[in-house]
Amino acid sequence: MVEPMKNPFVHRLNLGPVDVIKIGVMSFTIAPIRILIAGILLMLAWSLASLSLLFQTEIERQKPLIGWRNVLRPLIVFLCRAVFFTGGFHWISVKGSRARTELAPIVALAPHSSYFDALPVVYLNLTTVVAKSEVEMVPFFGKLIQFTQPVFVSREDPNSRLNTIKEINKRAHSKGAWPQIVIFPEGTCTNRSCLIGFKPGAFYPGVPVQPVCVRYPNKLDTITWTWDGPDAFKVLWYTLCQFHNNVEIEFLPVHIPNEQELRDPKLFSENVRLRMAKCLNCTITDHTYDDCRLILWAAKVKIPIVKRIVEIFKLHKKLGFNTEAMNEVLLRIRQQVSSEPQEKITYREFSEYLNISQNDSLQRLFKIYDFEQTGHIDIRDYVVDLCLVSGPATIEEVLKMAFQAFEYGHEGFIRSQGFKSVMVHIFEMSDSECQQIFQDIDSDDDQKITFDEFYGFSKTHSKYKKLYHIFQESTSNIFDLCVLNEISIENKEE
């Protein structure tokens, strides 16, 4: 059996009766007062940060804040801490001690699970952060982030990754002239159930890194903010409706890279991640920020097989397949299936189909399709998924390919069993749902339908409007091309 995948991007908030009553009462009493006071404090902090950055030239932006521009920092930090205090973060439990900038130019914070992770940054005296460029435009908060003299990352700019590494490298080797750089190496928010893959950007400079673990040991987790879970406003409001919110920060010993880690930033980041996972007593996973983007896309176009697609995508990366290679394999297998119709194949035959020697990743990929654990898989199931992960392809193209793969005797139509295989595999429908749809489409009761009949029926019958919307909303590619390009670049560079 394949081990079930952890999904670090999902969070469910289970409110009990007492929680509902507490939130209801505090929503009309304490929370509004907290919002008012926090708003006033935030306005004051924003005003002072704006004053500190007033008339700043481009040349000054390339240097650390000094002189009168830095005088107001203690007051700005105090006001920011007061904002969190007002919101219920009354104290911070701290373990270990912070290293001086000269000893650890970079601080790696994990796990990153919420915008409330700004509190550790405040605790660190509003030191430099690495942040996505969009936050610069956020009212009030954007100016406070500018005050930290951040290293901005544009996730849409293909050159941003290299420029970010260069800037981090410059500041990290300034011998303490620049303040410490705080980085959330995961690159996105998770539910803290595990540590996802660290981005290697913080580790390319090859300087000592101090790992810092962040915990929110609350009975009710209102803090976590993931793509699949309570939205930003609910997270904020539910948190404001708690009497007190616990937060712990633990400074681990500085990790000084050895010679091997200096040569291999990816190894450096992995070793730091393992140390932090041990401290947090959590597992690690190969999920990355790119997986989150893939899951977001899949959810947008209503593909209910997200977890399997992500797992398959990761395994193909481990097997050394880039987009071009996956397309070549897809074409080759389709030709083989067409000329030599052999539905069930063994692991050895699967290895021959892909022209890859047998290994753990290939075996794991095989087991995904060995639904009944018989040692045989239906190669057509793999063809459909390979179309999904190889991109670019729309859902319509995927369904066409699925119909072609499962069509009866290559005669242009599909029978009930083949139709069920397609619907179960792509839409995870029940047998009864598949049978009902097939009967509705098969108006002449000849026990066969074509793709055009299926498409036309789903488009014109309101009963199956959901299927029609899936076609309509899938005009974008099966992959966000940015994801594919970024991963392809990382594979080449790393």
Image (cartoon, grey):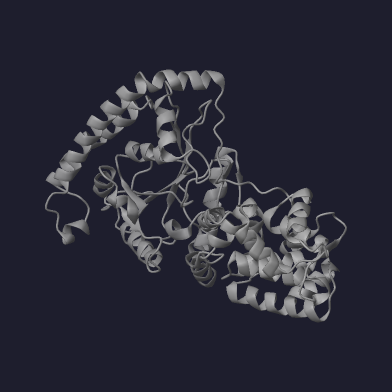
The residue lying toward the viewer, choosing from 217 and 262, is 217
The residue lying toward the viewer, choosing from 157 and 477, is 477
User: In terms of image quadrants, where is residue 37?
Assistant: top left
In the figure, is residue 449 to the left or right of 143? right
Residue 214 visible to an observer of this rendering? yes
Which residue is outermost to the front? 444
Would you place residue 151 above or below residue 251 in this image?
below
Residue 15 placement (x, y as % from top left): 55, 26
Would you place residue 276 above or below residue 330 in this image?
above
Q: Residue at x 64, y 73 (%)?
A: 326
Residue 96 visible to an observer of this rendering? no
Residue 353 placement (x, y as % from top left): 77, 75
In the figure, is residue 168 to the left or right of 8? left
User: In terms of image quadrants, where is residue 370?
Assistant: bottom right
Would you place residue 345 above or below residue 200 in this image?
below
The residue lying toward the viewer, choosing from 347 and 194, is 347
Would you place residue 230 above or below residue 358 in this image?
above
Residue 275 placement (x, y as % from top left): 55, 46
Q: Residue at x 77, y 61 (%)?
A: 442
Q: Residue at x 85, y 68 (%)?
A: 345
Q: How many marks?
A: 0
Q: Residue at x 64, y 59 (%)?
A: 458
Residue 199 placement (x, y as % from top left): 48, 57
